[in-house]
Amino acid sequence: MSDYLPVFIHFVLVVAVTALLLGAHALVGSRKPTPEKLMPYESGVWPVGDARERVPIRYYLIAMLFILFDVEAIFMYPWAVVYRWLGIVGLVEMAVFAGVLLLGYLYALRRGALEWQ
């Protein structure tokens, strides 16, 4: 139980600070709704058109490429930390992993996913 005491203290402090900040906002914050404040605003752009518009497939391709390279970075960092301990087997495994990701990148490049129109 003593091993979890710092985690419990941290949790209690987080809950207390959150409650304090939300309470201070409720007491001090101004509440003057105007039409401009009530208008939806997303990603730094004022909404134009219907919210039910179809999104081009290119958007999803870019999102998948981001995930592909994000996963690569997530797995390469811990590998680099323990590289000496893994030895040549770890190097070969990472080369295979990077090769598979390179194939995904080349496929996306060939399909034109990285070209903006």
Image (spheres, rainbow, N blue to C red):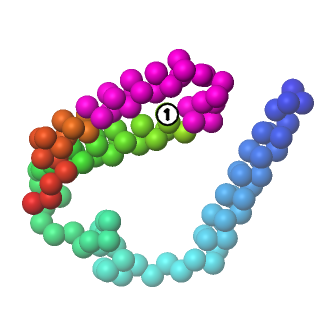
Taken as a whole, is the magenta stretch helix, strand or loop? helix
Total numbered circles = 1
Instruction: Looking at the picture, tell me which residue is in the foreground, 34 or 46.
Output: 46
Instruction: Looking at the picture, tell me which residue is in the foreground, 42 or 63.
Output: 63
Asked where in the image residue 45 lies, by quadrant, the reply is bottom left
Please say if 62 is above or below 82.
below
SS of the residue under disc 1: helix
Residue 68, given in percent of the width and then of the height, sits at: 34, 38
Q: In this view, does 7 lie to the left or right of 53?
A: right
Residue at the (37%, 42%) spot, across then down: 69
- Residue 110 at least partly seen: yes
Please say if 91 is above or below 51.
above
Please say if 68 is above or below 13.
above
Residue 106, given in percent of the width and then of the height, sits at: 21, 38
Q: Is residue 28 left or right of residue 54?
A: right
Asked where in the image residue 79 lies, by quadrant, the reply is top right
Residue 43, given in percent of the width and then of the height, sits at: 32, 65
Q: Would residue 100 be counted in the magenta stretch?
A: yes
- Please provide the residue range marked out in magenta: 79-103
